Amino acid sequence: MPTVPHHIAIVMDGNGRWAEQRKRPRNMGHKAGVKALKSTVEHSAKAGVKILTVFAFSSENWQRPRQEVTRLMDLFLRALEKEVKALHENGFRICFIGDQTAFAEELQNRMQEAADMTADNKRVTLNVAVNYGGRWDIVQAARRLAVAAQAGQFDPTELSDEVFAAHLATAGQPDPDLLIRTGGEMRISNFLLWQSAYTEFYFTPVLWPDFDAAELDRAIAAYQVRERRFGRTGRQLRAPNVA
Ligand code: IPE
Ligand code: IPE
Ligand code: MG
């Protein structure tokens, strides 16, 4: 049996273009995007994925027109109100990664409630990246380590990959095996910079609202024929005991 990626990360891009193609306001695309997210969450759990990390709002997305940002925040709040209970009942642990201090208090409270309510669930971890930036993540980890070192609580000569990763927003979780980006752009847009060092990338022109179970299966199938060498040679992988 080919292995299903343990951790999938998704850059859910293309909502705006999906709406524009239909001569509808961009917000309609974001609404359709929430539906696509719901079905992707369900399907990835059925497929056996254990961690799903979705990029919902980047630290750069504040630069969009104010009305679009407001609508996105409304949609986010409503999706939390509507979906968290069912996710909890279905065994999902919900985590938020990103700088939450920038959000309205009500939204922050709802996020905290969702995280607390689902904290002990074991079936699938759903990381929702909101106001997330890969550089922010690296800088906040470095800042905390520097502060701890200055206070004499951490010996900086002990800094290692593992210690650093334990201070990132994804602390305790394995890195993504597969990163999917919909919408046709072939860039990372400041998503999981540290964590994607050895992730397999899959780009598809499909716009996020059109992404469905069949598209997810296609991405997983593409992943399954990749050879993950991690610096070794292909021959070493096929005959691990040969020097
Ligand atoms: C992704 O879709 C959703 C967010 C960034 C919030 P976009 O809104 O970026 O859609 P396009 O790229 O303009 O089509
Ligand atoms: C990346 O999409 C962020 C999310 C999907 C939330 P963008 O649409 O913001 O990325 P760029 O600006 O095209 O790189
Ligand atoms: Mg976009």
Image (spheres, helix red, strand yellow):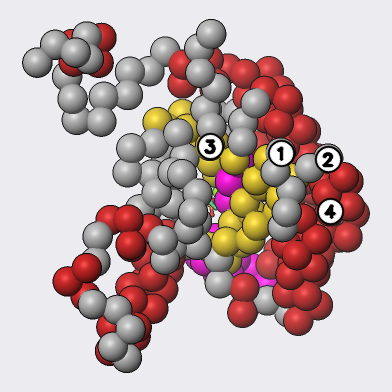
Secondary structure state at the residue bearing disc 3: strand
Which label lies toward us, 3 or 1?
Answer: 1
| Amino acid on which disc 4 is placed | Val
Q: Say whether marks 2 and 1 touch (CB < 8 Å).
A: yes
Instruction: Tell me residue 52's x, y (percent).
Output: 61, 41
Q: Is residue 44 magenta?
A: no
Q: CA gap, disc 3 to disc 1?
A: 13 Å
Residue hosting label 2: 90
Q: CA gap, disc 4 to disc 3?
A: 21 Å
Q: Nearer the viewer, residue 10 or 67?
A: 10
Q: Is residue 62 magenta?
A: yes
Q: Say whether marks 2 and 4 touch (CB < 8 Å).
A: no
Q: Nearer the viewer, residue 139 or 113?
A: 113
Residue hosting label 4: 84
Q: CA gap, disc 4 to disc 1?
A: 15 Å
Point out the residue furthest to the left here: 243
Mark drawn on residue 123: 1
| Amino acid on which disc 1 is placed | Arg
Instruction: Name which of mark 3 and mark 1 comes first in the sequence.
Output: 3
Instruction: Tell me residue 166's x, y (percent).
Output: 41, 61
| Amino acid on which disc 2 is placed | Asn
Mark drawn on residue 206: none
In the image: residue 143, left or right of residue 122: left
Q: Say whether marks 3 and 1 touch (CB < 8 Å).
A: no
State the residue at coordinates (87%, 45%): 89
Instruction: Name which of mark 2 and mark 4 comes first in the sequence.
Output: 4
Q: Against 200, is 74 above or below?
A: below
Q: Which residues are magenta?
A: 52-67
Q: Residues within 10 Å of mark 3 (few under 14, many from 20)?
A: many
Q: Residues within 10 Å of mark 4 (few under 14, many from 20)?
A: many
